[in-house]
Image (tube, helix red, strand yellow):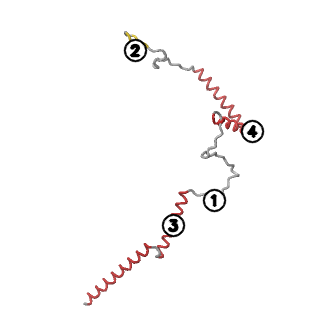
């Protein structure tokens, strides 16, 4: 926009947005729209409860809607795409052992190895246990020698 002698000149197609008029809806128009929406919801609810055959048809309709556009034209084999198939309650086997996750397996393995180490440590078969026992033997011998010296000093 340019200012020429106290006049504002706008270029074609580039007008400001602030001066636009506001449009308000009539209360009757709003009521009419709300009634139509309620009727659509009521009709949709009645159709869902009518039969399971309509559900099967709607599921095939949903698949065709998803396959619309380029996706419908091109068949893609994506190895990373996992299609989620829902299982029926009768098909699920609760008694079958479930596979542990990597973290759970590592945690269990860690606990078992700790228990094995503690068992060997108590038996004195680990390097640390041997070092501890040797240290204890040295300390016992030093204490016995100190006790003998004190006894000799008391007697002498």
**Relative to residue 108, is residue 18 depicted above or below?**
above
Q: Position of residue 121 (x, y in %)?
A: 47, 73
Q: Quadrant of residue 58?
A: top right
Residue at x 48% of width, y 15% of height: 12
Query: In which quadrant is the N terminus drawn?
Result: top left
Q: x, y percentage for residue 54? A: 73, 37
**From mark 2 to mark 3, how far is it between C-alphas?**
83 Å
Element assignment for label 4: helix
Gap in Å between the C-alphas at discs 3 and 1?
Answer: 23 Å
Mark 2, residue position: 2
Q: Secondary structure at mark 3?
A: helix
Q: Is residue 111 above or below residue 101?
A: below
Residue tagged 3: 113
How many C-alpha atoms fall within 10 Å of the one at disc 4: few (<14), some, or many (≥20)? few
The disc at residue 53 is 4
34 lies above or below 75? above
Which residue in the protein does label 1 denote? 97
Considering depth in this image, is 35 or 143 the residue closer to the camera? 143
């Amino acid at each position: 926009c340019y200012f020429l002698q106290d006049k504002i000149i706008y270029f074609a197609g580039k007008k400001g947005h602030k001066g636009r008029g506001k449009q308000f809806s009539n209360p009757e128009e709003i009521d009419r729209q709300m009634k139509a929406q309620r009727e659509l919801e009521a009709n949709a609810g009645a159709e869902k409860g009518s039969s399971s055959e309509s559900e099967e048809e709607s599921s095939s309709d949903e698949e065709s809607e998803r396959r619309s556009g380029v996706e419908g034209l091109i068949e893609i084999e994506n190895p990373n795409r996992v299609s989620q198939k829902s299982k029926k309650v009768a098909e699920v086997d609760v008694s079958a052992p479930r596979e542990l996750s990597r973290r759970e397996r590592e945690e269990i393995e860690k606990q078992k190895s700790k228990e094995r180490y503690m068992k060997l440590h108590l038996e004195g078969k680990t390097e640390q246990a041997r070092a501890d026992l040797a240290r204890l033997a040295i300390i016992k011998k030093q204490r016995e020698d100190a006790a003998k010296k004190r006894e000799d000093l008391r007697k002498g």
